[in-house]
Image (spheres, rainbow, N blue to C red):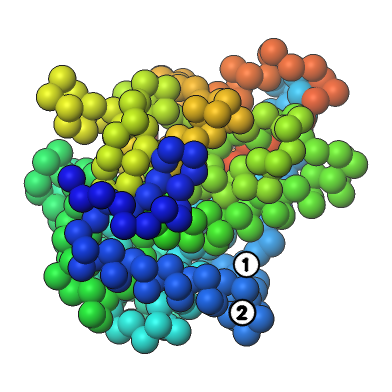
Amino acid sequence: MDQPLQQEGYFGEFGGSFVPPELQEVLHYLSEQFYKFRDDPAFKEELRYYLSEYVGRENPLTYAERLTKAWGGPKIYLKREDLNHTGAHKINNAIGQILLAKRMGAKRIIAETGAGQHGVATATACAMFNMECVIYMGAEDTRRQALNVFRMELLGAKVVPVNKGQGRLKDAVDEALGDLVQNYQNTFYLLGSAVGPHPFPTMVKHFQAIISEESKRQIVEKEGRLPDAVVACAGGGSNAIGAFAHYIDEPTVRLIGVEPDQAPSLTQGVPSIIHGFKCLVLLDEDGQPKKTYSIAAGLDYPGIGPEHSHLKVSGRAEYATVTNEEVLEAFQELSRTEGIIPALESAHAVAYAKKLAPTMGQDQIIIVNLSGRGDKDVEQVYQMLK
């Protein structure tokens, strides 16, 4: 196993960069460029422009009045990432990273995707900035999310189905990292989850932190105080780390990540190395990443972001699981009650908020991060309910 060549990029014992030396050089350069441009006034201004004029931010923090009444407990607010251009939180990070890629002179963008939302966001950003785009997607996920595959192709991307392993998100990441090693001289890997070797988890958090930056300001404007809990689904961890970021230093706010009960990396994982970084990983009896499954393709990953691993081990955040049945029920309940069809990923957060609500008082507040909309999942849910 390659040893980390640098100590930066750690969250407690998790994170780091366990990659071959030639890739380490590429990541070190990427890290330098990220830190250089992150605080550059011109970069920040351009990012602000596209988040406003292209993505449609800021999006609302919606009071779910009927859901609050139905659950009979705390006030429920929904952070509406489903209203972003392309229908999910993924575009926040895609725009940020592609502006960085542009400054670094990259001509070719590669990405991995599970549910297809990050693939669609990347393909959208590449179309906007006229860049070559290659998306790796597990073959199983291309079948589950055929509509998103067509969207990516419509936007000009080449979608490469990955048949290795289970043909799911982990396998797509494997292929994308392999491509980067082969083509690093002209290729920028636009990683969509808060995973991977340093600096990817830090970059993704930086571009997704806009979620909690807005929700924190919005809830104080609406209620005059911070929420009691923030709930988000957790697969790779990008929407959750974005939803948590500006509350991590607020000890009165509970941070709760929700996983599928068939891919419980944080609730059952052990410290290990996957995809070039250390995190909590589900391992089989041979010490290999365990096969996982979720009805939400975006949560089907045997590891988790290193910062989530640290938040779990340190006790700052809580992580729980929900069943497929609870998720399908939440998917339908939010649709009927508030007229909002959530992504299956987001429905995990809704399902857990429903279980959490009876344990809290009516004077309390829960923010649920609605990471995406459910257009992509309607046909799949239709088949499952049949």
Q: Which residue carries the number 1 mark? A: 56
Neighbor class of circle 1 (other Cα within 10 Å; few <14, some 14-19, many 20+) is few
Camera-side residue: 274 or 353?
Answer: 274
Camera-side residue: 103 or 112?
Answer: 103
Say left or right for 115 vs 58: left
Say left or right for 61 vs 223: left
Q: Most extreme residue toward the right, as rendered?
A: 224
The residue shown at (40%, 46%) is 15
Task: Tell which circle, 2 or 1, labels the residue nearer the N-terminal end.
Answer: 2
Q: Is residue 43 visible?
A: yes
Q: Secondary structure at mark 1?
A: loop
The residue shown at (70%, 54%) is 213
Q: Secondary structure at mark 2?
A: loop
Q: Mark number for residue 40?
A: 2
The residue shown at (41%, 53%) is 7
Amino acid type at circle 2 is Asp
Position of the N terminus by quadrant: top left
Give the answer, above or below, for where 314 lies relative to 145.
Answer: above
Residue 141, given in percent of the width and then of the height, sits at 23, 46
Give the answer, above or below, for where 140 lies relative to 329.
Answer: below
